[in-house]
Image (cartoon, rainbow, N blue to C red):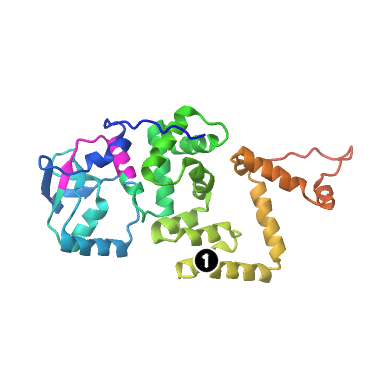
Amino acid sequence: MTRKRPERRGDLSGLLGSVQELTRPSDSDTLSVPLTQIAPYAGQPRRSFADADLKALAESIRQKGILQPLLVRPTADGNGYEIAAGERRYRASLLAGLTEVPVLVRDFTDEQMLEVGLVENLQRENLSVLDEVEGKLRLIALRLGATLPEARQRLIGNLRNEEPGDTAVFSEIFAMTGRETWQSFAKNKVRILQWPEEVLAAMRERGLAYSLAAVVAAAPADLRPGLLEQALAGATAQQLRASLAGQGSQSGTSGLEQEVNGVTRQLGRSRWIRGLDRKQQAELQKWLAARPAWMKQAGEPEAPTPTDEPVVWVD
């Protein structure tokens, strides 16, 4: 059954449906402002700007100028402007040697600044996966009036038991920010925020690609630093996997042992199990039921003797 898409709000408290109109220039409110009077907004959701992309945009600006004005608001002291949307164009304009840029001035609140910036950045194709995940989660939290952990919990929780109010917000956000559904995002991407902090830091600060980060994050903790160094030095995902397999063999761990250890770690995460939908849970139960009898028997705990101390399981 096809879900009905929620109506988009047109007021400034819900900019998802009107961000395109807000950034469309007109003769009445487009101003030319010196770059010295413009500064990035401190709450800008996008942290990484690829040098090559900025240089290419700067060259385009030299040849054609800025085709879309920056969206700004006046600073609190009234002496300049903060960028709500268009920081990439601002940085490229500096590289291009411009002294002035066209702007649209809007009296946004802090909440509206964040929402406009998130929507504008999430609509760009070259956004990093980590910035995308964190940006969408921040946008969900903003729209739900929740903290980031609460937004993540509600997003994953709706995979099992959908709440119409939540899913209407999810559907509206993902209709504006790309072809991906909120269900696919919750199942496949949100989990990267649980990757080791050193991996996330490399993605944020050094531009580590998602495909490489995934290999490093899945590796045993003692092998992770070496793999991370190789990844940042230019190794491919295939080379990282080969290195990981070689290091496992040298440490006395066979390929079978590595695979079993990986499955054990995955099945041991209760949050991961609770995040499965009904179909996935049924498939997992079917897979477990298909284990050989000797494996099921080996996995059964021995009956405690009267002198045994009780076993306390810690999740």
Q: Position of residue 17 (x, y in %)?
A: 31, 36
Corner quadrant of residue 145? top left
Residue in view at x 50 percent, y 50 percent: 192
Residue in view at x 20 percent, y 50 percent: 68
Residue in view at x 14 percent, y 42 percent: 26
Query: Which residue has dot 1 on it?
Result: 237
Task: Classify residue 167 as left or right of residue 220.
Answer: left
Secondary structure category for the residue under label 1 = helix
Q: Position of residue 266 (x, y in %)?
A: 64, 50
Residue in view at x 58 percent, y 34 percent: 160
> Which sits in the foreground, 126 or 225?
126
Task: Classify residue 12 as left or right of residue 257.
Answer: left
- Give the extent of the magenta segment: 103-119
Does residue 95 show up magenta in the picture?
no
Asked whether residue 31 appears in the rendered view, the answer is yes
Q: Position of residue 139 (x, y in %)?
A: 38, 39
Corner quadrant of residue 13? top left
> Which sits in the foreground, 55 or 305?
55
Task: Classify residue 10 as left or right of residue 104.
Answer: right
> Which sits in the foreground, 246 or 12?
12
Q: Residues within 10 Å of mark 1 (few under 14, many from 20)?
A: some
- The answer to whether residue 198 is above or below residue 19 is below
Q: Position of residue 22 (x, y in %)?
A: 23, 39
Does residue 106 show up magenta in the picture?
yes
